[in-house]
Image: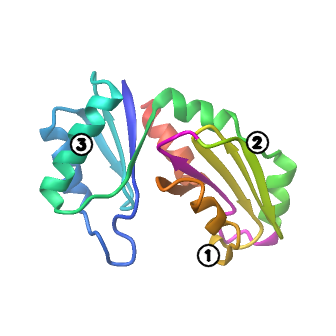
Amino acid sequence: MRYLALFRGINVGGKNIVKMKELRELFTELGFVNVRSYIQSGNLLFTSDKELNELSKLVTDAFVKKFDFSVPIIYRTKSEMLSMVQSLPFTVEELAEVESSDSQIAHLYVYFSGKEIAEQELSYAGERAVVRSKNIYYLTEKSIRLSKLTSQLNRLSDELTARNWKTILKLVDLLNE
């Protein structure tokens, strides 16, 4: 099974520094194959025949032992990522409209959760979020740094980590290799 591990809160603001080379080495030592990282924000792709519960515990324990701190790690299978991309709840027109406001910033993100969240839609002054299962699709006219809605989203689960759409599409491409 091809997996994606999304680490929350590493290499952000000079805290919880983890070199991707060391993270890849850890996953290889744990017996995973085809281990690959993408950018420094904690995206790791790997293949394993282990079930998710088993590999999750294995990785969490080994990560704490090696790096001496813990962070939430959200997992998705290749098929879950493909389905998530195909289920984008925003129209091409909605995406084009927010992109036209400022083409220099990312406008579309997905927050990944380790557990199910009740399906719902939230909005606030140019921001929209659509919750589907363990994913929150977030669309904003402005920079995510100016968001008033993200604090609400973060209250929906204590295990959230976000990636912008460009990164997500690249991760899906890497999963397909």
Where residue 163 appears, x then y in whole percent?
53, 56
The region drawn magenta spans: 101-116
* Label 3: how many Cα within 10 Å (few below 14, some 14–19, many 20+): some
Magenta span has 19? no
Label 3 secondary element: helix
State which quadrant residue 85 falls in: top right
* C-alpha separation, residue under disc 1 versus residue under disc 2: 22 Å
Left or right: residue 48 versus residue 88 is left
User: Residue at label 3?
Assistant: 59
Residue 117's place in the image compared with 151, above or below, is above
Magenta span has 114? yes
Please tell me which residue is depicted at 42% across the width and 31% down the height of the picture. Answer: 177
Q: Earlier in the sequence, mark 1 or mark 2?
A: 2
Where residue 118 appears, x then y in whole percent?
66, 42
Residue 165's place in the image compared with 78, above or below, is below
Please tell me which residue is depicted at 38% across the width and 29% down the height of the picture. Answer: 2
Q: Which amino acid type is shown beneath numbered disc 3?
A: Val
Q: Quadrant of the N terminus?
A: top left
User: Residue at label 1?
Assistant: 145
User: Residue at label 2?
Assistant: 89
Please tell me which residue is depicted at 48% across the width and 56% down the height of the picture. Answer: 158
Q: Which amino acid type is shown beneath numbered disc 2?
A: Pro
Tell me the number on the disc at residue 127. none
Label 2 secondary element: loop
Q: Which amino acid type is shown beneath numbered disc 1?
A: Arg
